[in-house]
């Protein structure tokens, strides 16, 4: 093969590889906002389906049997924690004629909680919504993880990153659904693992 053809093939291969690596990140950036409720004008205090937040450097250390605070802000499905997920609490939320359920899940293998959104009736489009999982320590917000944006939509089946929720009565978890303009839409009961 002549040298000029090898150079052209290599250039084309490099361009395809760069696009393959760049495209998922670009799609992620276009559909996700990391705006915290702490910066939202309606909040007095804070903290396509699924989340897409940047992984923590130690995300790979979180897996079934290796739970802990290193699991905070990691994907329950990518870490394998969702495979032992158990439904623990829920609450209703309304946005116009749309009836949603916010659900709290707990991984028995990882000791983590995350929120999931389920449509009960109406159109499958929670526009400008923010789904959160909260971890409370003696009633104060200790940490939260969220998915949603002011100019995007959440759909049934969307989930947040997970947070570690250790055994004992001092920490609880809860799910919340917010709208960027209307404020809180609904939340689940607080729950703690009694292990």
Image (cartoon, rainbow, N blue to C red):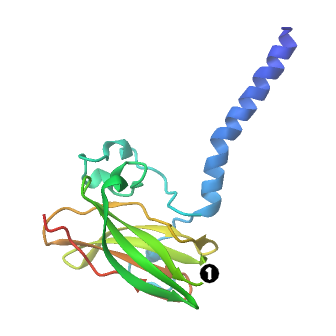
Residue drawn at point x = 68 percent, y = 33 percent: 17
Query: Would you identify the image quadrant in which residue 92 lies?
Result: bottom left
Report the front residue among 80 and 66. Answer: 80
Query: Would you identify the image quadrant in which residue 46 lies?
Result: bottom left
In the rendered image, residue 28, in percent from the top left (x then y), is placed at 60, 55
The crowd level at tag 1 (other Cα within 10 Å; few <14, some 14-19, many 20+) is few
Secondary structure under tag 1 reads loop
Residue drawn at point x = 30 percent, y = 55 percent: 84
Q: Can residue 40 be seen in this view?
A: no
In the rendered image, residue 21, in percent from the top left (x then y), is placed at 63, 40
In the rendered image, residue 35, in percent from the top left (x then y), is placed at 51, 69
* Residue that carries the numbered disc 1 in the rendered image: 123
Q: Is residue 55 depicted above or below 87 in this figure?
A: above
Residue drawn at point x = 27 percent, y = 78 percent: 190
Looking at the image, residue 20 sits to the left or right of residue 187; the answer is right
Instruction: Work out which quarter of the rendered image holds the C terminus and state it.
Output: bottom left
Q: Is residue 71 depicted above or below 120 in this figure?
A: above
**Tally of marks:** 1
């Amino acid at each position: 093969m002549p040298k000029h053809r090898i150079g052209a093939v290599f250039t084309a291969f490099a361009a395809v590889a760069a696009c393959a690596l760049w495209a998922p990140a670009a799609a992620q950036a276009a559909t996700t906002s990391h705006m915290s409720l702490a910066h939202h004008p309606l909040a007095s205090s804070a903290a396509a389906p699924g989340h897409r937040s940047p992984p923590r450097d130690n995300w790979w250390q979180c897996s079934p049997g290796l739970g802990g605070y290193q699991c905070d802000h990691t994907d329950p499905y990518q870490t394998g924690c969702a495979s032992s997920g158990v439904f623990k609490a829920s609450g209703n939320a309304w946005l116009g004629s749309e009836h949603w359920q916010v659900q709290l899940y707990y991984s028995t293998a990882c000791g983590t909680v995350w929120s999931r959104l389920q449509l009960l009736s109406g159109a499958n489009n929670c526009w400008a919504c923010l789904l959160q999982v909260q971890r409370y320590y003696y009633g104060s917000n200790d940490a939260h993880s969220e998915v949603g944006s002011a100019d995007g939509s959440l759909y049934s089946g969307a989930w947040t990153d997970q947070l570690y929720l250790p055994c004992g009565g001092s920490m609880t978890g809860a799910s919340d659904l917010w709208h960027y303009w209307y404020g809180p839409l609904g939340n689940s009961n607080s729950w703690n693992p009694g292990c």
